[in-house]
Image: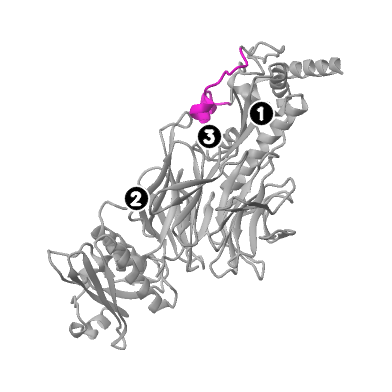
Amino acid sequence: MKKLKMLAALLVVTLVTACAGPSKSTVDEGAAGAAQGGAASAGVGDGGTGQGGGMGTDAAGSTLGGPGASQENRIIYFEFDRFDIKPEYNAILQAHARYLSSNSSARVRLEGHADERGSREYNIGLGEKRAQSVRNVLLLQGVVSDQITTVSFGEERPAVIGSDEEAWSLNRRVEIVYGQ
Amino acid sequence: MRDLIATLAVVLALTVANPARAELQIEITQGVDTALPIAVVPFGWQGTGAAPPLDAAAIVAADLARSGRFAPLDRKDMLQKPTTGADVKFDDWRRQGSEVLVIGRVLQPAADQFEIQFQVFDVLRGEQLLGYRQPATAADFRRSAHRVADLIYEKLTGVRGVFSTRIAYVTVVRSPGRSNFKSSYRLVIADADGENPRVMVESPEPIMSPAWSPDGRKIAYVSFEANRSEIYVQDLRSGSRKRVSARPGVNGAPAWSPDGQKLAVSLSRQDGNLDIYTLDINTQVLTRLTTGSAIDTEPAWSLDGSQIYFTSDGTGGPQVYRVASGGGNAQRVTFEGAYNARPRVAPDGKQLAVVHNDRGNYRIAVVDLARSTTQVLSDGRLDESPSFAPNGEMLIFATREGARGVLATVSANGRIKQRLSALEGDVREPAWSPFPPN
């Protein structure tokens, strides 16, 4: 079983390495960092260096999981009015799960967001559902529930200002924030 | 032409009444041709000092013009400016086309005690329709002038006026930039004409979902000041506030029960599943009304408190449902279109205002509960947060002007439209207050 898991992980990492970059390269550098606000920006917590747990790297050589993961490897994007996770994020989430499993004192906060369309409290619901989707994936991969908290900001804390498809797609997201 | 005159009259009256205090600028964007010509003559002054605290007649004329149902005569065009009934020459007013005439006087019985005496005449018949004395102080003079407008409006239309009501709204000012910006959120309460803005709360983190208590004395809202959602209840007069819900997960969408004892809220609690609960504000007793994996949120009480309308995406997209406030099975209420959310019950209980997806555009619509028909009232792309005026004649909602968030009002029949924009930043989430106590 363990072997199978590792094999699967390796396979996914390979796949992601092969077709990485482009889909995530539209991430506006620093945008999400700003959206995290004061307390959230504390960043690296008790987890240490992020080198443990045998995480993979993406095409650019960035760490996929843990607090050392690059900005783009700590944000999961969603389709409009959806909260299911696209397969392209499997590798990132597996890497985060592996880090959290092997660093039991590490804590992570999943911050769910929505784009500006539709009513505000419903969007709070969507953001929460998205954070819960990410949480469920992490739990399935062995992370202890005490390590995870969720919060939804709905459309209230956009990463990017704008009323076009690009801004909307960058705002429908879950940010994985360590040290919470 | 009449619309133009009305608009000019509003601009002029607002300028005269108060040059710089309003935070919101009001502009009539669509009026009606059937607006009633009315003349509101400057009120006489019988007190110490050069003038009364404010130009009451200008405030009254501006209120009536803003309703879209009256076209006040420009002061410059008045042939006479009578302040007593004996001085009125009805022929002059008839010749100018005014159908209704308002005259008045401000008296000062004591140092900080005023009385606005006014009379309303039917010009065609030469008859008095209404005569009234409205007491006032320097501090509440503006409110008293709005009350005069309310009384005139009610006499002429049969519907209680809302000029002395207030609106709550949220403003957001951001530092420049498409990303990497800082934000400042404020919960503001202002008079219905945008004057007297008061900042109730200010925070670098989001503030949302303001809701008036039925007695108009408190506001419930959601604040992220602790970096997560929490529900507060704030007393407007004292400014003191109480955190009423900070449970794990989402604490959102507070809505007051008609008796003011409970809030209906949306909570996600430990299981991360948004459901509708009622929360007794004093005892903190929670009653769960919905279960299941759907997003259940945005509750709104029926007038008698027996039902709660809410948004649920149980069938895919969000639709409005109804559940008994004591618990029971939920029933679907909206069927037209793929997106109907955030219900608000009309003051007569017969309609719901909702956010409705109209061919890709988010617009304000009213759903007739008996006939189940939907009428789209707004024409924006990203309209949201409808709130009924307490007399049911108008709705205020959030819309866009270019990239900016502004407020707009629309009459319940869709014919009269106005826009209210802030001098700075975005305005959103308007909530119209109940009627003030008599």
Q: Which of B73 and A7 is in front in this view?
A: A7
Total marks shown come to 3
Element under disc 3: loop
* SS at mark 1 in the image: strand
Identify the chain of the residue marked 2, using the numbered disc in the image: B
Q: Is residue A42 magenta?
A: yes
The amino acid marked with disc number 3 is: Asn
**Marks 1 and 2, how far apart in space?**
43 Å
- Please give left or right for residue B113 compared with residue B155 in the image: left
Are the residues under marks 1 and 3 on the same chain? no
In magenta, the rendered stretch is A27-48
Check disc 3 and report the residue beneath it: B227
User: Do the residues indicated by labels 1 and 2 lie within the same chain of the protein?
Assistant: no
Q: B417 left or right of A114?
A: left
Res. B87 image quadrant = bottom left
Q: Residues within 10 Å of mark 2 (few under 14, many from 20)?
A: some
Taking the spot 71% from the left edge, 58% from the top edge, the residue there is B327
Label 1 belongs to which residue?
A: A148
* Disc 1 and disc 3 in contact, CB within 8 angstroms: no
From the image, tell me which residue sits under label 2.
B23
**Secondary structure of the residue carrying numbered label 2:** loop
Few, some or many residues within 10 Å of mark 1 (<14, 14–19, 20+): many
Amino acid type, mark 2: Glu
Residue B430 can be seen in this image? yes
Residue B48 percent location from the top left of the image: 12, 66
Earlier sequence position, callout 2 versus callout 3 = 2
